[in-house]
Amino acid sequence: MQKTAVITGANSGMGFATAVSLARRGYAVCMLCRSEERGTQAMKEAKQQSGSENIHLYVCDLASFTSIHTCAEALKAEHPAIDVLINNAGIVTTKKQFTADGLEMMMGVNHLGHFLLTNLLIEQIKAAPQGRVVVVSSGAYKIGKINLDDLGGAESFTPWQNYGHSKLANLLFTKELSLRLHHSNATVNAVHPGAVSTSLGVDRQTGFGKKIHQLLRPFFQSPADGADTALYLAESSEVQHVSGGYFYKRQIQDVKGQADDAELAKQLWAISERKVGLTV
């Protein structure tokens, strides 16, 4: 039976490289993209590069709970089982911005948007023979801190620290979700992709970061290299029964500080449920 993979942020960078790789391996690939125009172009390119026609576009703006619900309903209607969900999309903003639901943008997209999407698709993931969730985090979690009273850190905004908050939230989400999946065949693991040459840190309005990115590009991995460990977690039999891990270059890593706090992970889950409207 053909496997199904769902990938967020699939129109460029690591997400695009992951989509092409999984399509080449015979997966039905669902590319989730914020922009229908950019997504359509990326889907055409992915079909050309992979030689597969079984690639489909779903518009999903992770900064809008309404958009996430609409996308999830479309996915569930067409895919009763989802073998792989790769929460790849990420954003860095250089100034304080808010989602359609009034949340600090980086925490809203990088954590809460993926939190909602994963929860909406969790029964389809558990319906697969061995469903896998892969969460793209970052070593930037080490500069993050979770303040449950100001989840996104909107009150004291600094770009990279707020990004770190959201990446720390990714690890705590992975930790708690692994416990909740314990009695199923599904697993969840997080990955630090390393320094990857993408447009993640480029502010599209101001161009901030573009010149720095161009200077540093020779030292970065390609998106395909960056996607390697995510693909390993999505496919390898070596990690079939591993859940709740944090991986870098295919090796499980120790996590430090708040990222290892099981009680904080549980509290963050409860607050996240309320923020996204899953509980009152």
Image: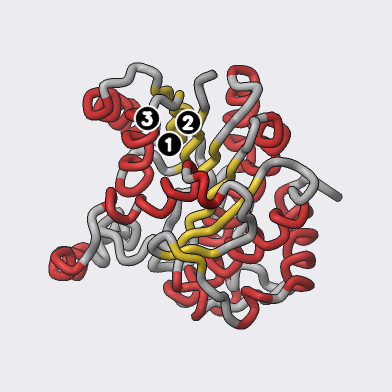
Q: Is residue 174 above or below residue 121?
A: below
Residue under label 1, please give it. Answer: 33
Left or right relative to 275: residue 225: left
Locate residue 119: give its quadrant: top right
Choose the circle earlier in sequence order: 3 or 2.
3
The kind of residue tagged 3 is Arg
Q: In the rendering, at what x and y percent does residue 3 appear?
A: 52, 26
Instruction: Classify the position of the N terminus by image quarter.
Output: top right
Q: In the rendering, at what x and y percent does residue 47 appear?
A: 28, 23
Locate residue 117: give its quadrant: top right
Q: Nearer the viewer, residue 191 or 102?
A: 191
Q: According to the image, what is the colour scheme of the structure?
A: secondary structure
For label 2, the SS is strand
For label 1, the SS is strand
**Count of numbered marks:** 3
Q: CA distance from mark 1 to mark 3?
A: 21 Å
